[in-house]
Image (tube, rainbow, N blue to C red):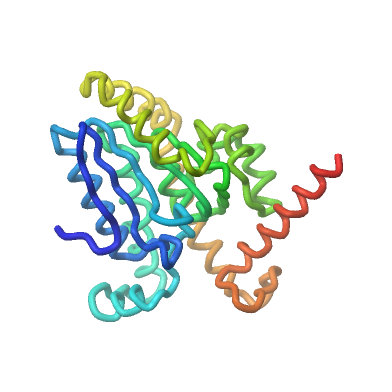
Amino acid sequence: MSYKHIRYETGDFIARITTNRPKYRNAQSTIMMEEMDDAFQKANFDPDVRVIAMFGEGDHFSAGHDLGTPEETEYRKSEYLIQEGVRGRYNHTREQFVDKTMRWRNVQKPTIAGVQGYCIFGGWIIASAMDIVFAAEDAMFLPVNFQYFSVPWDIHPRKVKEILFEGRFIDAAEAHELGFVNRVVTRDRLEAEVMEYAAKVAKNDPFQMRMTKNAVNGMQDAQGFHQHITSAHAMFLLSSQGEKDPDFAVEVPDGRRRPMVQRALENYREKQTKDGNK
């Protein structure tokens, strides 16, 4: 399979998957999601790959799902028809953003994400599915009640409620403090730090790493991780449908796709101002 929206490279027991739509801040097109799924499976079954490193080309890891770039619009018209109504939306969002992400989470090799710039909505989903997350100092994370709602597993539930109720960005330092990010590094060192760590991991025995990963993921699964993700997907569909209601309380600003992003930026800046005045 030749790739259009990602790059796939291997060497020294490490596979590198890089989303490659910097013009659109690596918005997750249908093509990108299909290609990522193929690349993860390729790396998973390649005996010469022991570690998978995930990057985003350009200034941003990912600004989330592709909500209508010309490429995505054309592709859906010609290649990827979605059934109308709730049934079609459920099937599409379940396969594209839940089932695929669960497969990436369960890849039988250690996975590491290097995150810079925006890591919004769908970007969080990808980062969350990785075993390790390194963030550049400029990384900005924005969680919400999205399709693969892993956030209560990534961060303590009380902190999740605080952030989601308020609706705001989390910078790299706070993400590290909350435990979502393993390490924070300078932007110019992000790729090198990820690859250096990956090289160390790649020296270990692959089967031992596989069993270790299964044991840790199994702990979450025993606590209900998979069932929670499945049921939360239905809550996402209901929540997103509610955005279309005439009584939707958040004003849609001019020139913005999602009012929640604008609101989150405002709330983050307000928090920064308050913290700076303390």
Residue at (48, 62) in percent of width and height: 237
Quadrant (top left/top right/bottom left/bottom right) for the N terminus: bottom left
Question: Is residue 105 among what the camera can see?
Answer: yes
Q: Between 145 and 208, which is closer to the camera in this rendering?
A: 208
Place residue 67 in its image quadrant: bottom left
Residue at (50, 55) in percent of width and height: 121
Q: Between 161 and 18, which is closer to the camera in this rendering?
A: 18
How far from the left and from the top, in percent, is residue 69? 41, 74
How far from the left and from the top, in percent, is residue 207? 21, 22
Left or right of residue 167, residue 51 in this image = left
Left or right of residue 145, residue 49 in this image = left
Residue at (21, 32) in percent of width and height: 12
Q: Between 72 and 3, which is closer to the camera in this rendering?
A: 3
Question: Is residue 214 among what the camera can see?
Answer: no
Residue 239 vertical position relative to residue 256 in the rendered view, above or below: above
Left or right of residue 100, residue 22 in this image = right
Count every numbered label the image shows and give the total. Answer: 0
How far from the left and from the top, in percent, is residue 268? 70, 52
How far from the left and from the top, in percent, is residue 141? 56, 49
What residue occupies the far right of the structure in this picture?
278
Quadrant (top left/top right/bottom left/bottom right) for the C terminus: top right
